[in-house]
Image (tube, rainbow, N blue to C red):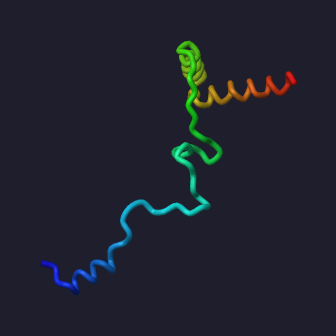
Amino acid sequence: MIDDELRKQLANIQGKAGRPKETDQYKRSATSEGTAQDERRATYILTNESIEELKAIAKLTNRKIKEVAQEAINNFIKQHHNER
């Protein structure tokens, strides 16, 4: 059995358990976990054909699907702004 003195020593040694709390400076939403600082996770529903085309283009150009999709979206946005 652990005596009171040893119990006090252990209480002083043990740190706080669990995940460290985030400061406001580094707080990010759950949709941003695992992404770069300027990115946010999003889900879109696309046709199977579009998905397969994106995957094929990524494979042919040796790029990530995310990069190909981002380029396509950026080009669409530029085209939209130019049509105004």
Quarter of the figure with the N terminus: bottom left
> In the figure, residue 73 lies in which quadrant?
top right
Is 5 located above or below residue 20 in the figure? below
Is 57 located above or below residue 31 in the figure? above
> In the figure, residue 82 lies in which quadrant?
top right
Residue at 63 percent of width and 26 percent of height: 68
Is 1 located above or below residue 74 in the figure? below
Residue at 62 percent of width and 42 percent of height: 39
Q: Extreme right residue here? A: 84
Q: Extreme left residue here? A: 1
- Residue 46 x, y percent position in the rendering: 57, 20
Q: Extreme bottom residue here? A: 5
- Residue 45 x, y percent position in the rendering: 56, 23
> In the figure, residue 4 lies in which quadrant?
bottom left
Q: Nearer the viewer, residue 64 or 60?
A: 64
Give the left or right position of residue 54, taking residue 14 as reference: right
Give the left or right position of residue 36, taking residue 6 as reference: right
Is 34 located above or below residue 2 in the figure? above
Quarter of the figure with the C terminus: top right
| Total marks in image | 0
Q: Nearer the viewer, residue 56 or 62?
A: 56
- Residue 47 x, y percent position in the rendering: 56, 16
Residue at 30 percent of width and 78 percent of height: 11
